[in-house]
Image (cartoon, helix red, strand yellow):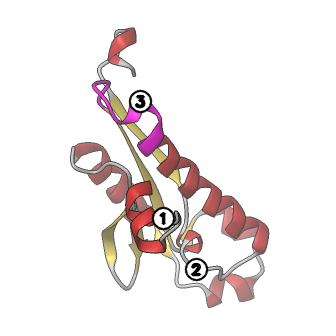
Amino acid sequence: MSKENGGHGGVVLNMGSVTSFAAIFDPLYVASKHGVKGYSLALAECDPSFSGADDIRIAVMCPTGVDTPFLKASPETLKTSLNLIPMSRVLDACIMAVEDETKHACCIRITHAYGIDLLPMKTPKEWETELKIWKS
């Protein structure tokens, strides 16, 4: 995708989850989704391919439970307790992320409550300011 290598830019969509904001599920799953979000932010902020002239954007899709064939093998109690969203809503969010050039370094939350909305990722400088990581 790199323009330096003859590409035309592009978009990387990583699949996260709302569990990267709230630990509400299996600890290993939550940890992996936190990792996806953190990895994506690090790429967007620290890798020159995602912050320069290469025109490569990155976003993290963060849906709640999605109605997929994977859940067909799940216990019925799990399926009925989850408020699953249709895969079509996730695809709509992916299309939005690809088509809208302002979508970069962000999490796109996909839920019943909020529909499809954008949660901008904080830059390291914003976290530094908010959390006072470094001594003054």
Mark closer to the observer (1, 2): 2
Along the horizontal axis of the image, is 103 left or right of 112? left
Q: Earlier in the sequence, mark 1 or mark 2?
A: 2
* Residue 107 sits above or below residue 84 on the image: above
Q: Residue at point 32% right, 24% down?
A: 54
Which amino acid type corresponds to the residue marked 2 in the rendered image? Answer: Ala
Task: Measuring from the top left, give residue 31's x and y in whole percent.
Answer: 71, 65
Corner quadrant of residue 36: bottom right
Q: Nearer the viewer, mark 3 or mark 2?
A: 3
Q: Between disc 3 and disc 2, whose residue precedes?
A: 2
Figure check: 78 above or below 95: below
Query: Is residue 15 among what the camera can see?
Result: yes
Disc 2 marks which residue?
22
**Residue at the image point whose x is 46% and y is 66% from the top:** 136
Range drawn in magenta? 44-55
In this orientation, which residue lies closer to the viewer: 110 or 50? 50
Q: Nearer the viewer, residue 126 or 100?
A: 126
Residue 18 lies left or right of residue 95; in this view the side is: right
Kindly report the distance in space between the C-alpha atoms of the residues bearing marks 3 and 2.
30 Å
Residue 123 in sight in this render = no
In three-dimensional space, the C-alpha distance between marks 1 and 2, rounded to whole angstroms, equals 11 Å
Q: Which residue is mark 3?
A: 48
- Can you say which quadrant of the picture contains the N terminus? top left
